[in-house]
Amino acid sequence: MPQPLKIDFVSDVVCPWCAVGLASLDRALEKLQGEVEVELHFQPFELNPQMAPEGEDINEHLAKKYGGTQAQRDAARAAIRERGAAVGFTFNQRERTYNTFDAHRLLHWAGLEGRQRELKAALLRAYHTEGRDPSSHDVLAGVAAEAGLAPARAAQILASDEFAAEVRANERHWQQLGISSVPSVIVNDRHLIQGGQPPEVFEQALRQIATAA
C-alpha cells in the first residue's frame, strides 16, 4: 500500500480564497478516493495579526489594504461568490473582518483530538456563510461543539493561553519557509500549490505527485 500524501493546508479562517481552496481540494479528493490517500493537516496563518479585538469594517479594511474602487471590490467579491458556488461553498454578506489567533489555537487542539478537518469546515462556514465573529469566545466554543468537540474544554482553552506558543511557532515555521499568502498547499513537504485553485488542478497535481512517489 503506498504511503499517504502529507498535505499541509496553510490558511486563515477569514480568507475567502482559503474557503474556495479547501472546497476545491475536497472535490478533488472525492475524485481520487481509492486511488490516492492523504493525511490533511491545517496550519495557521493570520491575515490580520495586529487587528483590534472588535475587528474592522470589511470595506474599510479592504480599501486600506488593497486600494481600488468600491466597484472593483464588489466585482472581486462577486467573483469569489461565483467560485465558491461552483465548488459548493456559500458566501453571504460579511460586515467585518477579525483577528483569528484564538481560532487557530482551537484548530491546534482539534488536531490533537482528531477533529481538525471538521472544525476548520465549521469555522469557515460560521464566518463566510453565517457572518459570525470568529474572534468571539462564545462563538468559537459553539462552533467547536458543532464540530464534535467538547465546548467546555474549548471554553477552558480560550480562557487561557493554552496552545498559544505552539501556534506562534507554527506560524513562524511557515513564514520562514517563504509562505506569505494563503491558501498555500504543501504536499510531502516539497510541492507547493498556491491559491484557491479549481478541483481539477488539485486532482491532477495530487495524482502526479502520488504516481512519482
Image (tube, rainbow, N blue to C red):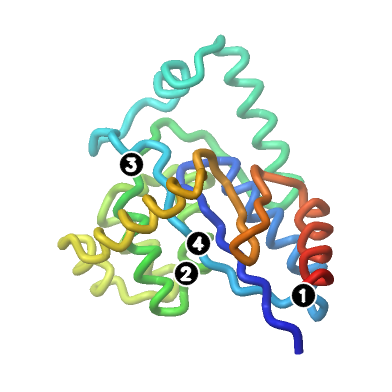
Tag of residue 99:
3
User: Which residue matches tag 4?
Assistant: 42
Write the residue at 37% across / 36% down.
Answer: 48
User: Which residue matches tag 1?
Assistant: 36
Please name which of the two marks, 4 or 3, marks the residue nearer to the observer.
4
Q: Give the CA distance from mark 4 to mark 3.
A: 17 Å
Write the residue at 63% across / 66% down.
Answer: 188
Task: Say whether residue 173 is left or right of residue 152.
Answer: right
Q: Are marks 3 and 2 in contact (CB under 8 Å)?
A: no
Q: Give the CA distance from mark 3 to mark 1.
A: 35 Å
Q: Secondary structure at mark 1?
A: loop
Q: Are marks 4 and 2 in contact (CB under 8 Å)?
A: yes
Q: Give the CA distance from mark 1 to mark 4.
A: 19 Å
In the depicted view, which residue is nearer to us: 142 or 98? 98
Tag of residue 116:
2
Q: Residue 53, image x and y in percent?
A: 23, 38
